[in-house]
Amino acid sequence: MILVETVAGMKALSRGWKRAGKSVGFVPTMGYLHEGHLSLVRESKTRADVTVVSIFVNPTQFGPNEDLDKYPRDLAKDSAYLERAGVDVLYHPPAAEVYPPGYRTYVEVEGLQDRLCGRSRPGHFRGVATVVLKLFETVGPDLAFFGAKDAQQVLIIERMARDLDLGVEVVTCPLVREPDGLALSSRNAYLSPEERQAALALSIGLRWAERAVAAGERDPAKVVAGIRAVLEAEPLARIDYVEAVDPGTLEPVAEMRGPVLVAVAAFVGPTRLIDNVRIAV
Ligand code: AMP
């Protein structure tokens, strides 16, 4: 595996692959890798000739009171993990390479960026869309792999790729969970043993919703209320939002019919976690 730390170095490699007619698969991450990230890597390796993983903790997607400084980082461990997984290139640029002094340009995906997580994290998806566009420009992927764990993020990236004619196929990979249901996340590293237990309320609430809909519940207000009740029964959890939305527009649905994205964000102690299920009736 090659470690690349400059924009110019990454672009040069990518140009070489293009000339050789090789397809490039790309997995953007913020590192502190887990099995969820690895599932994207595996998918890329089956679908593309060359696989690039980026590790970049993107400052522009963090709010002023968020966890940018304490976001978990372990480049040595991540690098060994990716090497074993057969990744070709680890792209790890410093922030000053991505955002040099005087940087002024941002991408906004209107509407979609303001719903769900966008409401409680203003500016977050502007930062995400901007860095992903820059990474696409540098890495030159044919295919880019994202996890359904961040359902709103994938939708926004898909929209951006189409709107800006990027020529990148955005592939959504399934959400990977722990055996007890907790969605894998780098932020799970923040949880104390008690918080780790309390965090199960998110997936328990969503599983309850799946069962309720399977049993015939069609009222989204009742589905949302049921999930809220599960979370409210957990003293360490504090709800940010629970919503049942159209997976294409993220607008609240009037009825649990067709595909519905049921999405949750909650603080467990100081840690904000998200989870979702897509229910198809
Ligand atoms: P992150 O490092 O958290 O920015 O995530 C990088 C990529 O990994 C994103 O496309 C995420 O959606 C994906 N990802 C993170 N956690 C999971 C998970 N539990 N299952 C599937 N994909 C995930």
Image (cartoon, grey):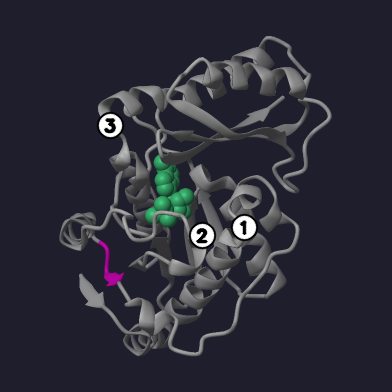
Q: Amino acid at mark 1?
A: Pro
> Between disc 1 and disc 2, whose residue precedes?
2
User: Residue 220, can we see it?
Assistant: yes
Residue 54 sits in quarter:
bottom left
Q: Does residue 72 sit above or below 167 in this rendering?
A: above
Q: In terms of secondary structure, where does tag 3 sit?
A: loop
* Residue 90 falls within the magenta-colored stretch: yes
Q: In terms of secondary structure, where does tag 1 sit?
A: loop
| Label ID, residue 192 | 3
Region rendered in magenta: 87-91
Tag 1–tag 2 contact (CB < 8 Å): yes
> Between disc 3 and disc 1, whose residue precedes?
1
Q: Does residue 230 sit above or below 154 in this rendering?
A: above
Q: In terms of secondary structure, where does tag 2 sit?
A: loop
Q: Residues within 10 Å of mark 2 (few under 14, many from 20)?
A: some
Q: Amino acid at mark 2?
A: Gly
* Residue 183 falls within the magenta-colored stretch: no
Q: Residues within 10 Å of mark 3 (few under 14, many from 20)?
A: few
Tag 3–tag 2 contact (CB < 8 Å): no
For this rendering, which residue is in front, 258 or 50? 258
Residue at image mark 1: 122
| Label ID, residue 74 | none
| x 49%, y 61%: residue | 64
Residue at image mark 2: 63
Q: Residues within 10 Å of mark 1 (few under 14, many from 20)?
A: some
Q: What's the CA distance linking mark 3 and mark 1?
A: 28 Å
